[in-house]
Amino acid sequence: LGAPTGPLTFRATLERAGGGTETLVERTIHPRSDVSARRWLPVAIDLGRYAGATVTLELSVQASGLREEASDLVGWAEPRFVSSLPAS
């Protein structure tokens, strides 16, 4: 794998219904120079403090040097929301 792109910045932001945006996680990887970054990297975000609130969650990737080749695909995969609250 040539991994010709990078760096790649993964960001999760949350926007509250009443206004205001907060960055929940921001992680920059360099797959060109860091071979260990050429895989799926797990991320966990605790949204417990927003329970009951209406929010918008945005997952984004900022890529430098991105070329339109199959080997350059990057993104978030299989986001899951898990509740620790007991079922009622």
Image: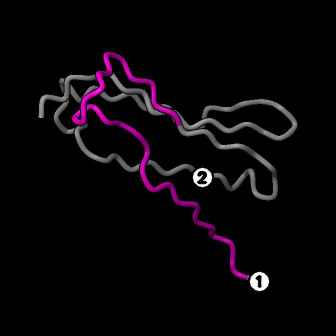
Foreground mark, 1 or 2, reads 1
Against 5, is 24 above or below?
Answer: below
Q: Quadrant of the N terminus?
A: top left
Specify the segment rendered in magenta: 60-87
Question: What amino acid is found at the position of numbered circle 1 in the picture?
Answer: Ser
Question: What amino acid is found at the position of numbered circle 2 in the picture?
Answer: Asp
Q: Looking at the image, which residue is at 29% across and 22% down?
A: 67
Residue indicated by mark 1:
88
Dot 1 or dot 2, earlier in sequence: 2
At label 1, counting other C-alpha atoms closer than 10 Å, the crowd grade (few under 14, some 14-19, many 20 or more) is: few
Viewed as shown, does residue 87 lie left or right of 2?
Answer: right
Q: Looking at the image, which residue is at 61% across and 39% down?
A: 58
- Outermost residue to the bottom: 88
The colour scheme is: one colour
At label 2, counting other C-alpha atoms closer than 10 Å, the crowd grade (few under 14, some 14-19, many 20 or more) is: few
Mark number displayed over residue 33:
none
> Taken as a whole, is the magenta stretch helix, strand or loop?
loop
- Outermost residue to the top: 65
- Quarter location, residue 18: top right
Against 36, is 77 above or below?
Answer: below
Residue 23: percent from the left, percent from the top?
A: 61, 32
The front one of 42 and 72 is 72
The front one of 70 and 79 is 70
Q: Secondary structure at mark 2?
A: loop
Residue 64: percent from the left, percent from the top?
A: 36, 17
The CA distance from mark 1 to mark 2 is 21 Å
Q: Is residue 37 magenta?
A: no
Q: Secondary structure at mark 1?
A: loop
Residue indicated by mark 2:
46
